Image (cartoon, coloured by chain):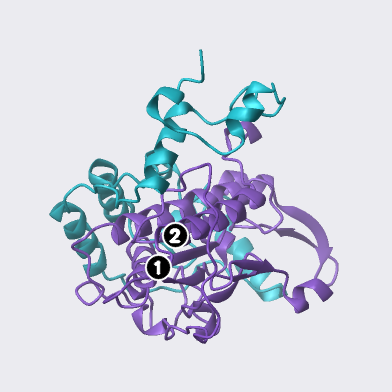
Amino acid sequence: MTEDELTPCRYRFALLRYIHKIAALRAIFPTARILLSKCDFKLAYRSVHFRAELALQRCIITKGLGGLDLALVYLHTTFDGSPCPSIFSEISKTVTNLTNAIICCSDYNPASFPSHYSHLLGLAKAEPNNVPLAAAYSLMVDPEADKFGITDVFLDNTFSAVPQLDGDSPGDRSAQAALLALDVLGQPLLPDGGESLLETKSSPLTRQLAERLVVLGWMIDTQRLLISLPANIFSA
Amino acid sequence: MGPPWRSSGFSYPGLDQRLQLGHPQFSQPRATPSLRLHHYRYYSQPQPPKWPPPNPIFLAAIKDALAWHPPPRSKPVLKFKLTELAARTNLESLESCNYDLQAILLEDAHSPRCPGSKFCPTAISAKTLLTLLVTGSPKTDRSTISRSLLVPVSC
């Protein structure tokens, strides 16, 4: 495995792209609320397995268990493996691509295509009406935003921004499409919750549609078009 | 002779002036004229993009994928505890297969340790992705889809 063959992962660009897309949505729909949502992959890197040959190359030989020689073999890609973010990104980007394709499919109706995760989606939370929606400056690039909203990804975090238009269910379609894409490419949610791609143990609040949401460690407020560092992350 | 996008009527406040002054940042415009043209159309006359008509094949592929149910799980042959008993059991399993770890993993097809155990079968996901590749919307990143068809669930 050579580094040149891997797709680059750049955190800064994912966040910048997302912010630009939100600004573009506000520029196109100045009176619409923009609802954000996100979902995480469960044990992201552990979804990918090493081939036996590679696993054996990476094994650690140590002493343990009362002096016995012990070979520790990692069958999954590990958190500290340098190629792992890129490898997993190919999977998460595919899920995001599928999500965007589902959202843009005008025949898609969440009620007709319920995913096994549908019930995990929290209710939309809008901010009070007393704060006017901030206006967006025009952009020099076209982030390809439209009424369907956008879904983007960085490693194991997928995040959406969707305008709440008149007569539209508030972003539900977008968030459900993200869950559907995970369902289509991954194992369906089993009763024991063991092998699904979606992180189901996290709080339902993290999958709630909201105008203020922490995405990639930053609090994004689409009502005021502000981005700030949450206090707990700042202190950490 | 002005910039190539000038004839289209596009102007950006301050940009033309800086171009004339030979501002180092703008002497070589980074964005292509077509992108600037698009910007002009996009923000001056916002219009929804023209999407291709919905393709029933794509949604049918998604329905097929949703209809798939995984077979019952089996317990992995190898033990994953840091105990002497687990180490001995694993050693016996390896000895019985002539130390061919790959053979043990592939034999363990329905266990969570089998490569791809978190994903739906490749035949189903590939069908969905190929449909997406053929019928995808303009937002579809075809290069990612093409790559992901080759990216294995084991590496």
Task: Determine whether A57 is above or below B18 in the image.
Answer: below
Residue drawn at x 19%, y 74% as measured from the top left? A112
Image location (x, y in percent) of residue B47: 30, 51
Q: Which mark is residue A89?
A: none
Q: Nearer the viewer, residue A133 or B94?
A: A133
- Whole-angstrom CA distance, mark 2 to mark 1, is 7 Å
Q: Quadrant of residue A19?
A: bottom right
Q: Is residue A55 visible?
A: no
* Chain that bears disc 1: A
User: Which chain is represented by purple in the image?
Assistant: A
Q: Nearer the viewer, residue A198 or A99?
A: A99
Look at the image and give the colour of chain B.
Answer: cyan
Q: Earlier in the sequence, mark 2 or mark 1?
A: 2
Image location (x, y in percent) of residue A8: 61, 41
Residue drawn at x 78%, y 55% as measured from the top left? A61
Three-letter residue code for mark 1: Pro
Image location (x, y in percent) of residue B89: 61, 69
Q: Which mark is residue A25?
A: 2
Q: Nearer the viewer, residue A174 or A65?
A: A174
* Label 2, residues with CA under 10 Å away: few <14, some 14-19, many ≥20: many
- Label 2, secondary structure: give it: helix
Q: Which mark is residue A163?
A: 1
Q: Is residue A114 left or right of residue A60?
A: left
- Label 1, secondary structure: give it: strand
